[in-house]
Image (cartoon, helix red, strand yellow):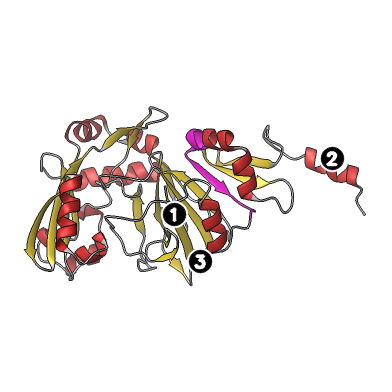
Amino acid sequence: MISSIQKLKSIKAQKVTKNPTVNCTVWSEEKGFPLVVKPSTAGMQLNDWVAANRIEFENKVKKYGAILFRGFHINTVEKFEKFSKLYAETPLEYNLRSSPRYSVGKNVYHTTTYPKEYSIEMHSESSYAPNHPSNIVFCCIDPADQRGETPIADNKKVLHYLSDTTRKKFQEKGVKYVRNLNEAFGLSWQEVFQTEDKEVVQAECDEKGISYEWKSDANLVLTWNKKAIWEHPVTGEQLWFNHAYFFNKYALEASFFNLVETDDQLPNNTFYGDGSEISKAEIEEIREAYSKATVIFPWEKGDVLFLDNMLMSHGRNPYEGSRQIIASLF
């Protein structure tokens, strides 16, 4: 039997940070993120560590943008809800929706119910919306049988990898978003706004500076402009933060174009802020920039991934089998 002294020696020999209760490493030394935080003692509660080390935790989020908590066994919706309440008694609701999701708890959602054979392209959560979340937190209740990773990318690096010409165009012009809400393709306006009342929709659009046009009772077209490149409110860093790529027609699966006859029928599209086209070559440039800035790690049951939503973007790889990843916004 190992003595208590021997156990203490073995713990001291581990690679730890100044705080002795957790072990910290960086998943990709080359990219510099995510920070991986593991308990150094059995049975340690993640909530207790975060509550007791709030400033240290927040500093790590600012530095790394992404923290993967592993080994804390946050493996149920109830545990994740309890963890989420450390940040806000009422996490943000998923408003002005761009993908179908269903609630599994109090403002806790199953991640996008999108066909498993497709990728979900890189994006920062709701960066298109007039009011976007500062943070998004994922929790792995059950990993996929194969693949199903959530790639993450550093938005500072994405911006860096763009050409000077493309970067300047987005800096000067911003992004124009066009959403065509109908029952045939994509989401209905009832799903997007979570209401059956057209007057409620119109009031929300007026409040948020979104132009709207009712093509019919079932078809609503929305347009609005927003910056493409932002300054982080805490770190002051310049960031690529928008849905210019994610919503653009050239980022869609090729098979989707078999379903529509004209661009006007697409559920989403993006343009430069002056209405000019973002070219296919520019979309491919953005795709390559994301690729260079991305890290991929395999999910393990009980993992929690905390992202600064402005510093980091994320996506989803195709997968096989079942997969349950839940999320909450702040």
Q: Earlier in the sequence, mark 1 or mark 3?
A: 3
The magenta segment is: 61-72
Measure the alpha-carbon separation of dots 1 and 3: 20 Å
Where residue 319 sits: x, y (%)?
44, 66
Task: Determine which residue is flagged by label 1.
Answer: 328
Residue type highlighted by circle 2? Lys
> Is residue 2 shown above or below 310?
below
Residue 63 among magenta residues: yes
In the picture of the structure, the residue carrying the numbered disc 2 is: 9
Q: What residue is shown with label 3?
A: 144
The percent position of residue 91, horizontal first and vertical second, equals: 42, 51
The residue drawn where x is 59% and y is 43% is 50
How many numbered discs? 3
Q: Residue at x 30, y 45 (%)?
A: 127
Q: Is residue 34 visible?
A: yes
Secondary element at tag 1:
strand
Q: Quick check: 247 left or right of 158?
A: left
Q: Is residue 252 magenta?
A: no
